[in-house]
Amino acid sequence: VIAYEISNTLRKQLSKRFKFSPVFVAQSISDIQNYAPLAGILTVTVLQHLSGDALKQALGIFQKSLSPEGTVICMEFFPENKQAEDGYICVSDWKNLITTHGFKITNMVQIYNPVEFPVKSWHQYQNNTFIQLIKPFKSLWPIQFILKQMACKYIRANQDIITNNQSQYRVYILRKNTA
C-alpha cells in the first residue's frame, strides 16, 4: 500500500503511524511511480486542492503507474459552475482533464459531506454534550442506536438535510481508456 498526503504535517504523522506496517508513505506524488504497476489508487479530497499544473502532473503519474486493469477511486469536490470558487476547477474541466489523461469514468456517485457543508442539524448534533460523552463508545450497538436516533431527531426538527443529488462531492471510479 502506498500512501501520499499533500500536507507535510499529516505525511509525517502517517509515516510514524505506519512505520512497522506494509504501508509506504510517499514523500512526493512522483514517488508513486516507483511502485508501478499499481492495482488501485485512492484519493480522498486531495486532487481538488491541486493547482492546474499539479493536477495534470498527478493524473499523468496515475496514468503511468496504474496497471492496465487498475482502478482510480477519487472522492473529490469540484463545483458545477464555471466560475469555480476558492481556486477549485469546475466539474466539466475535471472531466475534460480525466479524458485528456487517458481515463474514463466508469461510475460516479454523489455524496454529502457534512463537515464541508454543515447544516444546522449537523451543528446541533456535533455540539450536543451527551453525544460527545458517548461517542467514544460508538462501536457498541446500543450507542450506535442512540446516536442514530439523536441524528434523526435533529434532522426531523430542522428539515435541513442535503440530499446526495444536491451535493457537489462525488466519488469517481476511473479506469484507463483503452478504446
Image: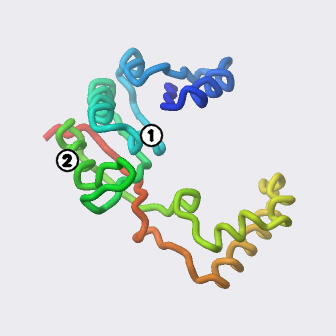
Residue 113 or residue 139, whichever sits in front: 113
Q: What percent of the width, then of the height, locates residue 62?
A: 32, 30
Dot 1, how many residues are within 10 Å of its Cα: few (below 14), some (14-19), or many (20+)? some
Question: Which comes sooner in the sequence, label 2 or label 1?
Answer: 1
**Residue toward you, 78 or 176:** 78
Residue 38 % position (x, y): 39, 26
For residue 140, above or below residue 159? above
Q: Residue at x 74, y 75 (%)?
A: 149
Tag 1 residue: 46
> Disc number at residue 96?
2
The answer to whether residue 120 is left or right of residue 49 is right
The single residue placed furthest to the top in the displayed view is 34
**Label 1 amino acid?**
Val
Q: Can residue 68 be seen in this view?
A: no
Residue at x 46% of width, y 61% of height: 111
| Whether residue 76 is situated above or below residue 161 in the rendered picture | above
Amino acid type at image mark 2: Asn
The quarter of the picture where residue 98 lies is top left
Q: Which residue is drawn at 39% across and 30% down?
A: 39
